[in-house]
Image: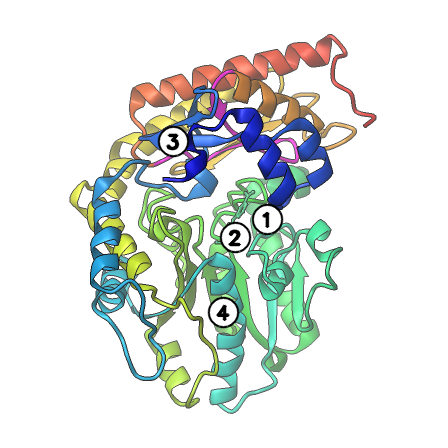
Amino acid sequence: MASLHNASTEQLQELDALHHLHPFTDTAALNKKGVRVIKRAEGVYLWDSEDRKFLDGMAGLWCVNVGYGRKEIMDAAYQQMQQLPYYNSFFQTSHPPAIELAAKISEVTPAGFNRVFFCGSGSEANDTVVRMVRHYWAALGKPDKKVVISRENAYHGSTMAGASLGGMKPMHAQGGLPIPDIEHIKQPHWFVNGYDQTPEVFGKNAALALEKRIEELGADNVAAFIGEPVQGAGGVIVPPSTYWPEIQRICKQHDILLVADEVICGFGRTARWFGSDTFNIEADLMAIAKGLSSGYLPIGGVVVSDHVAEGLEQGGEFNHGYTYSGHPACAAAALANIELMQRERIVENAAEKIAPYFQQKLFEMADHPLVGQVRGVGMLGAIQLSPEKPSNKQFSKGGVVSMVCREHCMENGLVMRAVDDAMILSPPLIITESQIDELFAIAKNSIDQTYQDLQDGKIDFSS
Ligand code: PXG
């Protein structure tokens, strides 16, 4: 246990400010305010260093699907560390946990996916995707098929290729991104981009942007299209029902690989094992991470369909890999996590019981005067705040009102994420009905308070 276990909040904040650079953070602003220190967790709850309790409406960062405190996963990692804490899978070696996990992944993934390349995270998975799809086409004698098409406002990670694939403008603005041969088309975000059309018409039109871009670039130059079945970090953007079938048709017709980024949607998040199951996507490759180990230890992977695996085999050596590809302790934790999900029928239970209840409570928020749209699927939800209803109007400056709402949520004991003006939910899949009631009671109260703040002119849009 860390020696600072009994340190005061102030001591921890001071040391953190001195030595710790946080992801996606304005360091100066954070250090002025002081970081919140999370100390322990159990089930769906977190406790901070002041012993304040929070319901974790985000399952960490969309990952703790089986909830906190699952001893089976800890024991599996501990036992594996005693047996073999580390060995690599380069140079014609392997080890039991990586072998067993690879086989287990092919059991739960959609038909036709039987091979996995391991890495340490979702970002590494998507870096691997870029190199792998280009290597695949080169192996088939088509080295010009290099461009990967993604979407505006997508999130695919923070490495150079991951952030390039992502469509977040502020990320591209730093560090000389995107890398070459990455293209972006519009996102299927009906509320923001397609409000003047029916969702079905807009969904098809958004997909047709892919066909148009392929035709502009020439299909001979395009390797793949990548998309999250539901854009998570972009704001839980659930595409209209017409979107994925049209994307599928376009990829097939133009001989473009379809990559499903299942980093958030995988392992039960949409109340099926994969987002591809929920949306009937027949992908050629899938990026996985997060729910693979429920975040207990870092691990990711790229799962490839049989025909992609065959193509790759024609390419000889794939000059790519990580020290921690298939790390034994991480693989053992992931295996224990999936076995636990199967034993406790966590995905089935989500589909039959918890997700319908979660969606019902989520959609009850649509009546609120501050809520412009509610969207969700499975155990994902977004409550879009809007200044005027019914309309798709947005506040004069995005992300201000939602940050106020987020602060109210925290004060009231709920972790909810704010994306632009949407409040985002992605709780552990093991949340109970009464905990869902608690979650939405706090959410509603916090949105009420935010609405009151707006009416009282307390929200400052100028800073
Ligand atoms: N793909 C998707 C769809 C993701 O959501 C990644 C790839 C990258 O995974 P790693 O393991 O490298 O982080 C992600 C990660 C947020 C937030 O604020 C979302 C993610 C990560 C950090 C913050 O919503 N998603």
- Between the C-alphas of marks 3 and 1, the distance is 38 Å
| Disc 4 Cβ-to-ligand 1 distance below 8 Å | no
- Which structural element holds mark 1? loop
Q: Which mark is residue 168?
A: none
* Measured Cα–Cα span from mark 2 to mark 1: 7 Å
Q: Earlier in the sequence, mark 3 or mark 1?
A: 3
The image position of residue 390, as x and y in percent, is: 65, 23
Q: Position of residue 290 (x, y in %)?
A: 41, 50
* Residue underneath mark 2: 243
Give the vertical position of 52 relative to 358 (above or below). Answer: above
Name the image colouring. Answer: rainbow
Three-letter code for the amino acid on which mark 3 is drawn: Arg
- Identify the amino acid type marked 2: Tyr
The residue where tag 4 is placed is 129
Q: Earlier in the sequence, mark 4 or mark 1?
A: 4
Q: Tell whether label 4 touches label 2 (CB within 8 Å).
A: no
Which three-letter amino acid code belongs to the residue tagged 4? Val
Residue at 69% x, 64% y: name it.
178
Q: Secondary structure at mark 4?
A: helix
